[in-house]
């Protein structure tokens, strides 16, 4: 939220310095335990928030420009590097967009393996956030390393779950960070059923540990907060949303997966290196676990649905962003349970990938990164090379919602000591699991249509 | 002065510049050993994982990411003065990484293409390796770094000895792994002969050619490999093979400048542009 300071009768802006006891300035120069570099600035005058800004000072890397002239398979390798924590999300949105344009039908087992790969990333990323980045807020520690001194079994459990996610990624993709096997038409290599067997065993333990995770976070003490956000995620009739579905919002948007830009747009705001996204009429919306859980309750794995029901948190997950840790834990359980099911039903496809021919046109797709909807759009030229690109990461879309929540939440902490109030505000930002390296990649406003 | 014989733990900082966070994540990905490993050090600065901060000094500083803004340049210069042993981790810090492809582009045009208001954006024309700006004591390569190499680095720091990291081409790892050579058997262009090992010949094991993410092997004859690829390929297609995550490292850099492969400044041929890493 960017509110212009009020102007007094003489036409001069109000004095900017805070008056003790009445005005408050909260500044966090470097938000820690998030992925990437950002800062928070919040100003309160006369009890009202006049500025709430999440600034992203992560250096720009210009990915949309770097992929120009490259082939689709090269793009999959390049866009992976936008984020070391969710590289599969970038690979998935890109590969599905290209396959849609080239009218490639992949083998159902390839489709299942891609879902398994995405499960691996969700497990790894959600466990990382819940246990190593977010839980210290609730248990009162500066880091998971410090927390381990008193709560070693908790940290060890988080690391054990995270490891299973990384094992899935390495088994399918060669390595956990920037895996190398995803190719247009399939994979460069697919595993044998025997190669997946050790994962199957590890997932039994991970499912149990994820259930314990849900119980643990449901017991955390969470600040009171209520805001009804406009939620956006993919929705699929039979699958919890990963790679397929329609783009749906709680405000009534319902679009094909390649038409994000029909309802949403990116804008540039001064003071931050990430573009922000809004609905075409300027509306703020929320992506991520809370949005998915709320919009797709019917496709959760039965184990996850049961665990959610037991927590009784379904409603507050929607309206209190501090409860995102519970939403993430439910999805962690979903991903572990579904990964196990996929392995149980796996038959190695005859060919790792199908042959394809590039064609010019628009390649667009959205998938669900751990943090929310990730939209890619590419224009391909006659040689099947990239002529233009737009990548809209979840965190740039959530920025406006983060600022809206900061502005709405801030008045409730003004009576707390300054340090504690600042910590509460910082915690609120961490509740979004912001991925700031992701967010700092931008719209190419000069897309050239293929001739 | 304390006279106790007990050695204090080395103080460690972990910071990032232009990068994806993946190499820092490699540390947290040492799941089984993480708690033991961090117990051997005093990790005083690691903002991705801890809200406890320190302005230094550091016995060891692990640096991820390329230098791509004036602020980053100031920061790395200052950090160097507070650091005994500075180690770059990964292709971005060691070679400039994927964002160094901008070094072949007209930065003003790129920034204007990406931002409606380029004047709001503080960024240098180049993204360059840390060693172009300050002294670097050791480098880990890879996009991302290899965990075994990270473990070895940390062990060497804890023990106060030099890290023992094997210097050999991907080809040697490929042979030991028992891969069929993708270049010889399938004609897939592969940078394995001229790329440093460390990945365990991952891409060839998955039926792909190596894309050079650990950077050029010392004294590699990359030019000769490029020439052999050009027998049946367009120069720009060969240039593109080298225009990846370590494109800015010589001799890959000269090959990219000469053959093209990455997108070039539309104002003129790439070869006309300076590629000496000058960052002003």
Image (spheres, coloured by chain):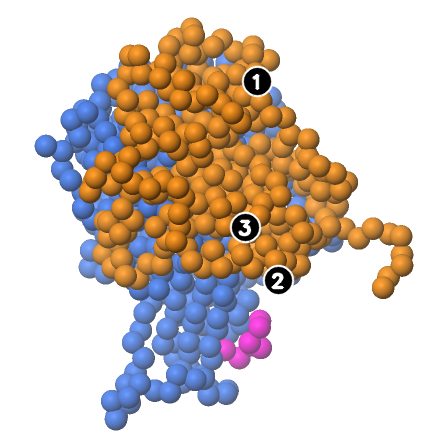
Chain colours: A blue, B orange
Determine the image quadrant of residue A127.
top right
Cα separation, mark 2 vs mark 3, equals 18 Å
Residue positioned 42% across, 6% down in the render: B185
In the rendered image, which quarter contains the C terminus of chain A?
Answer: top left
To which chain does the residue with label 2 belong? Answer: B
Task: Assign a secondary structure to mark 3.
Answer: loop
Q: Which residues are magenta?
A: A414-420
Q: Position of residue A5 (x, y in %)?
A: 32, 79
Q: Position of residue B201 (x, y in %)?
A: 52, 20
Q: From this view, report whether residue A48 is shown above or below residue A363.
A: below
Cα separation, mark 1 vs mark 3, equals 32 Å
Q: Which residue is mark 2?
A: B55
Q: Give the class, few, some or many, for how many residues have Cα within 10 Å of label 3's Cα (few <14, many ≥20).
A: some
Q: From this view, report whether residue A6 is shown above or below residue A216.
A: below
Q: Which residue is mark 3?
A: B134
Q: Which residue is mark 1?
A: B173
> Can residue A416 be found in the magenta stretch?
yes
């Amino acid at each position: 939220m960017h509110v212009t300071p009020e102007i007094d009768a003489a036409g001069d802006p109000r004095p900017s310095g805070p008056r003790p006891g009445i005005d408050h300035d909260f500044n966090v120069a470097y938000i820690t335990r998030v992925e990437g570099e950002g800062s928070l600035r919040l100003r309160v005058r006369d009890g009202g928030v006049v500025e709430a800004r999440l600034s992203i000072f992560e250096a720009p890397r210009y990915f949309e420009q770097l992929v120009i002239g490259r082939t689709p398979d090269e793009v999959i390798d390049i866009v992976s590097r936008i984020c070391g924590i969710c590289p599969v999300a970038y690979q998935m949105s890109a590969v599905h967009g290209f396959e849609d344009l080239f009218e490639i039908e992949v083998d159902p087992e390839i489709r299942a393996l891609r879902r398994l790969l995405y499960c691996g990333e969700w497990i790894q990323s959600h466990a990382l956030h819940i246990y190593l980045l977010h839980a210290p807020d609730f248990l009162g520690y500066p880091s998971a390393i410090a927390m381990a001194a008193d709560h070693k079994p908790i940290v060890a459990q988080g690391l054990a779950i995270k490891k299973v996610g990384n094992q899935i990624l390495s088994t399918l993709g060669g390595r956990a960070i920037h895996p190398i096997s995803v190719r247009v038409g399939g994979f460069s290599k697919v595993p044998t059923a025997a190669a997946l067997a050790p994962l199957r065993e590890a997932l039994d333990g991970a499912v149990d540990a994820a259930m314990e995770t849900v119980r643990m976070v449901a017991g955390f003490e969470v600040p009171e907060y209520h805001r009804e956000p406009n939620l956006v995620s993919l929705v699929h009739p039979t699958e919890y949303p990963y790679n397929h579905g329609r783009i749906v919002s709680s405000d009534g948007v319902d679009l094909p997966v390649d038409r994000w830009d029909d309802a949403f747009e990116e804008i540039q705001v001064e003071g931050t290196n990430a573009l922000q996204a809004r609905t075409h009429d300027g509306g703020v919306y929320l992506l991520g676990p809370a949005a998915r859980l709320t919009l797709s309750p019917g496709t959760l794995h039965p184990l996850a649905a049961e665990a959610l029901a037991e927590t009784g948190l379904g409603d507050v997950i929607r309206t209190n962003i501090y409860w995102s840790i519970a939403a993430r834990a439910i999805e962690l359980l979903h991903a572990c349970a579904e990964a196990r099911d996929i392995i149980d039903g796996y038959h190695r496809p005859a060919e790792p990938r199908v042959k394809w021919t590039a064609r010019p046109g628009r390649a667009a797709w959205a998938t669900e990164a751990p943090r929310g909807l990730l939209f890619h759009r590419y224009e391909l030229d006659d040689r099947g090379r990239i002529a233009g690109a737009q990548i809209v990461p979840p965190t740039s879309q959530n920025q406006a919602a983060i600022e809206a929540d900061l502005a709405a939440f801030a008045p409730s902490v003004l009576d707390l000591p300054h340090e504690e109030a600042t910590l509460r505000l910082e915690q609120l930002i961490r509740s979004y699991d912001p991925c700031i390296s992701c967010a700092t990649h931008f719209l190419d406003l000069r897309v050239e249509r293929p001739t | 002065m304390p006279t106790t014989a007990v050695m204090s733990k080395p103080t460690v900082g972990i910071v990032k510049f232009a990068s994806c966070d993946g190499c820092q994540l490699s540390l947290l990905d040492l799941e089984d050993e993480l708690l033991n490993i961090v117990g051997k050090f005093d990790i005083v600065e690691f903002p991705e994982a801890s809200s406890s901060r320190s302005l230094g000094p550091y016995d060891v500083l692990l640096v991820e990411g390329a230098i791509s803004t004036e602020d980053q340049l100031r920061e790395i210069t200052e950090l160097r003065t507070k650091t005994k042993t500075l180690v770059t981790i990964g292709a971005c810090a060691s070679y400039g990484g994927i964002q160094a492809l901008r070094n072949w582009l007209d930065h003003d045009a790129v920034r204007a293409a990406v931002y409606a208001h380029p004047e709001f954006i503080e960024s240098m024309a180049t993204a360059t390796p840390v060693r172009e700006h300050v002294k670097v004591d050791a480098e880990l390569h890879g996009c991302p770094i290899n965990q075994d190499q990270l473990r070895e680095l940390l062990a060497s720091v804890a023990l106060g000895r030099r890290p023992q990291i094997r210097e050999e081409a991907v080809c040697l790892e490929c042979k030991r792994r028992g891969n069929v050579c993708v270049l010889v058997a399938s004609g897939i262009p592969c940078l394995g002969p001229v790329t440093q090992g460390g990945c365990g010949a991952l891409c060839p094991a998955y039926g792909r050619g190596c894309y050079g993410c650990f950077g050029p092997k010392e004294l590699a004859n990359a030019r000769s490999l490029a020439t052999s690829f050009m027998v049946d390929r367009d120069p720009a297609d060969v240039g593109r093979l080298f225009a990846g995550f370590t494109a800015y490292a010589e001799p890959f850099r000269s090959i990219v400048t000469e053959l093209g492969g990455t997108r070039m400044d539309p104002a003129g041929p790439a070869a006309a542009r300076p590629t000496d890493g000058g960052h002003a």
